[in-house]
Image: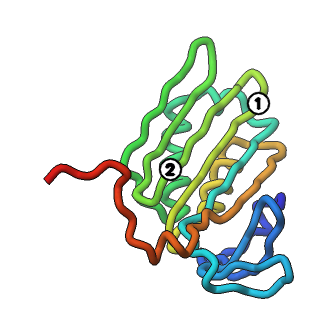
Amino acid sequence: MEQSLSSLHPNPGWATTERTTNISSVAANSCATESGATDTSATDMVGKHCILELYDCDPSKLDDETFLRDTITTAAQRAGATLLNLITHRFEPQGVTGLALLAESHISIHTWPENGYAAVDVFTCGDHTMPEKACEVLSEELSAGRHALRSFLRETPAALGTTERMPAIPIAA
């Protein structure tokens, strides 16, 4: 399901129940089945993953490592996430890659100033964060002329939550 930034649910609990075959937006702790019924035992939500494509961006912003570091930091804050570490690298002759390690997961960005394009990945665990807010900040700050946002829930099969898991290789005592 492609979504515009303005159409996303403002609640970090994502209280809508809509599901497609490859991208879903499902309420926490519930899963819509193919028949439309809700199955609360099928999966537990681990987090929400947003894939953002930014087009027609300001090339000078896409090539400014310091600007991108500040923007990623702001994006993490706006999402309600805890920034643990931020690493960036500027390529020659152009382009920047950035990775923000969050307590809740990560934000990554790869830029192509020569094309006015940025590829963004925002994954946050838990229901207290809003990765869409990070996407909104990045889209606005990079002056994107257009964007494509896809988001889905990362779901853990219920069996993993109720079964004691043992390592494949025994741990030495």
In this view, the residue in front, 83 or 139, is 83
| Residue type for callout 1 | Gly
Which residue is located at x 18 percent, y 49 percent? 172
In this view, the residue in front, 70 or 165, is 165
Left or right: where 122 falls relative to 162: right
Residue 37: percent from left, percent from top: 79, 87
First in residue order: circle 1 vs circle 2: 2
The answer to whether residue 144 shows anywhere in this view is yes
Residue under numbered circle 2: 106
Left or right: where 104 falls relative to 17: left
Residue under numbered circle 1: 116
Q: Is residue 71 above or below residue 13?
A: above
Q: Is residue 167 above or below residue 29?
A: above
Gap in angstroms between the C-alphas marked 1 and 2 = 23 Å
- Helix, strand or loop at mark 2: strand
Residue farthest to the left, as pictured:
173
Which residue is located at x 76 percent, y 79 percent? 32
Residue 115: percent from left, percent from top: 78, 25
Which residue is located at x 61 percent, y 63 percent? 154
Q: Are marks 1 and 2 in contact (CB under 8 Å)?
A: no
| Residue type for callout 2 | His
